[in-house]
Image (tube, rainbow, N blue to C red):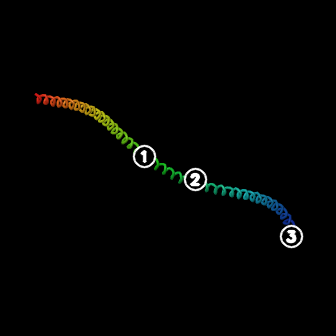
Amino acid sequence: MKADINDLLQQIEELKGKTVLISQENSRLNMMVEEKTNENQNLRRRIDELENELRVVEQLNERITELVKENERVSNELQKKEQDNRGLAAEIERLQGEIAKRTQEADQLVNQLHRAVDEIQEREKEKNQMINDLQQKDGQIKQLGDNLTESQKEIQKQ
């Protein structure tokens, strides 16, 4: 039995040594668990930060999408306005041509009017000259009539 007790004592000593080793291993593992827990907490905080940043990025993405759509709308509107402007420029050019043509026609009409006024003034001069000639001839005819009347009176007196 003494051998059994010695065996048991030796096993107890071995178990005490193992207990010290297990206790040291347990302490080491506890420290590792604590480090890993700290790492996990740090990682959790970083994950939360990244999730917040991701929300911000998603909001920015949505805003960028809105801005792209707005930019496309404005670009389309600008293209339409440019097309309208090209149409207006063509219309302005056509109207300028029409104005030039009408101005030329008006200038021709003004020249015709000046010629007509000159002709009317010339005809007026001719008319006035004819009236003067007629008045002179009328005076001459009256004189001849008076002379004829006097000559007839003298002939009758004789």
Marker disc for residue 79: none
User: SS for tag 2?
Assistant: helix
| Residue at the image point whose x is 83% and y is 65% from the top | 15
Q: CA distance from mark 1 to mark 3?
A: 118 Å
Instruction: Mark 3: give few (<14), some (14-19) or many (20+) Cα within 10 Å.
Output: few
Marker disc for residue 64: 2
Residue 149: quadrant of the picture: top left
Q: Nearer the viewer, residue 1 or 141?
A: 141
Count the labels in the image.
3
Query: Among all residues in the image, which is located at the extreme right?
Result: 2
* Figure check: 96 above or below 57: above
| Residue at the image point whose x is 86% and y is 68% from the top | 8
User: SS for tag 3?
Assistant: helix
* Residue position marked by numbered label 3 in the rendering: 4
Marker disc for residue 88: 1
Q: Can you say which quadrant of the picture contains the C terminus?
A: top left
* Figure check: 48 above or below 106: below
Answer with mark 2 or mark 3, whichever residue precedes in sequence: 3
Q: CA distance from mark 2 to mark 3?
A: 84 Å
Q: Nearer the viewer, residue 85 or 127?
A: 127
Q: Can you say which quadrant of the picture contains the N terminus?
A: bottom right
Residue 142: quadrant of the picture: top left
- The amino acid at mark 3 is Asp
User: SS for tag 1?
Assistant: helix
